[in-house]
Image (cartoon, helix red, strand yellow):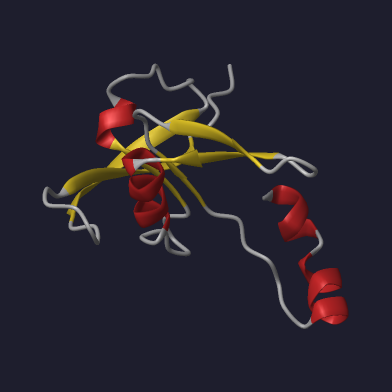
Amino acid sequence: KEIIESNKIYYFEKYSITPVFRASLHAGTLIQGLIGEVKSEIKYHGDTMNTCARILGNTTEEHDYLISEYLLKKVDLPAIYKSSDLGSFELKGKQKKVNLHSLSTAPVNHL
């Protein structure tokens, strides 16, 4: 993200657009398949991928890194990150609302 930000003028002058980086994090069961014989590639499928894609659709300029509460409860967030509860969201194709948190870099404490 920092590299994109530091080169945004270059990208705009060359491509007339500035790229953005957004991410969503979720956890669950996946189905992995190997597709193709000549040019094979690994594909992942399942409800977890769908949920993660739907979470990504809720990212904004202000909240560009989102993590599901389900995953947040399962991991120890490194000290360099902080999370902010954004509440429950209705995601397309989901019967239950999903609680989302925004991730950001925590302020550095200097000694």
Residue positioned 54% across, 34% down in the render: 33
Find residue 37 and report its horizontal and vertical position in percent. Answer: 73, 40
> Which image quadrant for residue 108?
top right
Q: Nearer the viewer, residue 3 or 58?
A: 58
* Above or below, 71 relative to 66: above
Residue 5 vs residue 47: left or right? right
Check the image and name the residue furthest to the front: 37
Residue positioned 24% across, 57% down in the render: 91
Find residue 53 and report its horizontal and vertical position in percent. Answer: 41, 53
Residue positioned 20% across, 46% down in the render: 98
> Which image quadrant for residue 57?
bottom left
* Above or below, 13 relative to 6: below
Q: Nearer the viewer, residue 14 or 32?
A: 32
The quadrant of the picture occupied by the C terminus is top right
Check the image and name the residue furthest to the left: 96
Residue positioned 71% across, 72% down in the render: 18
Q: Nearer the viewer, residue 88 or 29?
A: 29
Q: Nearer the viewer, residue 31 or 63?
A: 31
Residue 73 vs residue 1: left or right? left
Find residue 31 and report its horizontal and vertical position in percent. Answer: 43, 32
